[in-house]
Amino acid sequence: MNLFSDFEQRVRAALHTLFSEQGREVDAGLIDRVGVEPPRDRAHGDVSTNAALVLSKPLGLKPRELGVELGMILEKDEDVVAVEIAGPGFINLRLSDAFWARQLAAILTSGTAYGHSEVGAEKPVNVEYVSANPTGPMHVGHCRGAVVGDAIASLLAATGHAVTREYYINDAGGQVDVLARSAFLRYREALGEDIGEIPRGLYPGDYLKPVGEALKDEFGDKLLAQDESEWLPEVRDRAISAMMSMIRNDLADLGVSHDVFYSERSLRAEGHDRVAQAVQALRDRGLVYQGTLPPPKGQLPDDWEDREQTLFRSTEFGDDVDRPLLKSDGSYTYFASDIAYHYDKYLRGFRDMIDVLGADHGGYVKRMKAAVTAMSGGEAELEIRLCQLVKLFRAGEPVRMSKRSGDLVTLSEVVEEVGRDAVRFMMLFRKADAPLDFDFQTVTEQSKDNPVFYVQYAHARTASVRRQAKEEISDLDLRPTELAKADLTLLEDEGERGLIRLMADWPRLVQLSAEAQEPHRVAFYLYDLASAFHAHWNRGKDSPQLRFIKPEQRELTLARLALVSALGTVVRSGLEILGVQAPDEMH
RNA sequence: GGCCCCGUAGCUCAGCGGAUAGAGCAGUAGCCUUCUAAGCUAUUGGUCGCAGGUUCGAUUCCUGCCGGGGUCACCA
């Protein structure tokens, strides 16, 4: 449990005591609004509660009066050394050295599990991310969603959810047919034909050349004599699996892994047509009808035709218009398939689903949430996190990309140039719903200006101090469980105490980040923690008495090494969630 | 035009309904070869886009404007 929820319970217990003494009753809903938080300004104390502000009015008291009464009870807590009523009626508590020493020891005994919790109660959560079309290698545009989705999944796992990481393969629509035709062209090329320019509308990238070669090796020139209707399914299958193995490699380079790769095509397998089932489920609830849609306001598409179609009544669940389930040729729309896919998740037992999508899918959010609510009868809920675009820069200059020529910057190029850690950290060093500037130069600098370096260096520095300590003082037992036994109340410097308080905030931060599904908070926290640690280290320059290793003061050294080790542990724990390495030395 | 996201220091951005709104860069002023370095310390700078509303309390929640971006049946 994090220390703030711990004290929240203590405050509630104190309220209970107070009210039963006085024979008063307070609405439970109000008690729920009582919270315990770190004060914005640490000078105000260690923990702060708004209890008196929230409850004074219904009790007909002034906040400060109620604060004094409550404070008298809280003062009896053995971990509380001082109570102050401040500002409009905040109750600020200062906690004992022994309490903080216990927090520090807990980090050392828990290791990187420190900060993890069981609040998720093993509830199944399905997190879908990447789901890039299997028509080419991953480019940088995919990469933010991949990293963000992966980190959200890790956050949920760290807070005790049963997480399934999933990738939806769009292998059923028209564009995989285009892929097949593009690959077929490369096949003819492999057979020696001069194919000239790749026609518009086909995929021009060189990455299909090996697919053409492989087709030649497998089929010889046999396919040339066939109709497209004959060769297309064969070529398509092989092209898709080639693309997927390329994508899996790209993902592996980025350190992103999925538990399930779910094929859109498999939704329609003989015997259990999930699409038909999902549509039927909606029909059973009276949510499917034949009707016409109003034309979109503003710019009217050239080929707009007013016709009757099969519609899902998504407006009943907050969507702006109803959505078609069948195309004019009678086949299912992509949306219908996607409903089926989410219906399948529902049938697999997921009641909480999260989709991480690019911001260009923003228009898709309401209808998909509506569909999940509808087909599950309100039992399941879908949350959609949108990621804004990434703009690439090189030393401040924008990197030009042209989609038409296939001249996109691929994910593997970026990873190769700047490294997995830099890509991952920077993708998370900004709120997901804000656009991101990514500069190749900055993220590879070994300087304070590069946040990746700065945070990793903090970890390396803790390892370095431990190595140095062993060299300077023999027979030190630096195992965390041993360091936890040191006299940690010797850490009396304000810088040291500040670091302990910051570390003790980690469990709460993990929980809040997971609830908000905002992994960038972890990245910012790590940056702050690294910054505080570097600053404290630098104090040792002017004040040698603050240095970690004092050979003539063994007990103090052990306490400080405990502090340093704990700090390394928290940094590692955070980087683990972000999927970034925590190196023991920088090169 | 509808919908979604964004608007906070000169720049890039943090900020779960709480107290005097923070950080980095840039600017300014100093310091500097240290347990492991790729610098350190201090400091200037704000009508939180505008106007209302809810609240004991609003940068945060709601509504309406203004400005920027994305998106808009039958592609996926």
Image: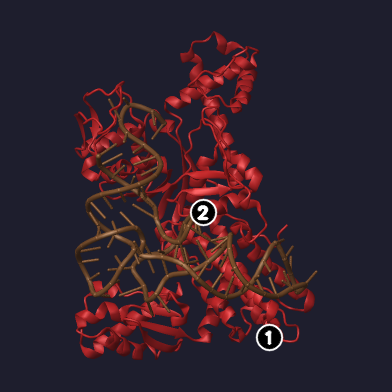
- In the image, residue A488 sits, relative to residue A240, either above or below, namely below
Mark number displayed over residue A428: 2
Mark number displayed over residue A329: none
Discs 1 and 2 share one subunit: yes
What amino acid is labelled 1 in the image? Glu
Q: Quadrant of residue B26?
A: bottom right
Between residue B54 and residue A16, name the one nearer to us: B54
Q: Real-space Cα distance between discs 1 and 2? A: 40 Å
At horizontal 48% and vertical 37% (from top left) the residue drawn is A132
For label 1, the SS is: helix
* Chain coloured brown in this rendering: B
Tell me where residue A577 appears, x and y as whole percent: 53, 58
Say which colour chain A has: red
Between residue A121 and residue A529, name the one nearer to us: A529
Which residue was labeled with disc 1?
Answer: A555
Which marked residue is nearer to the observer: mark 1 or mark 2? 2
Quarter that holds the C terminus of chain A: bottom right
Could you tell me if residue A481 is visible in this image? Answer: no
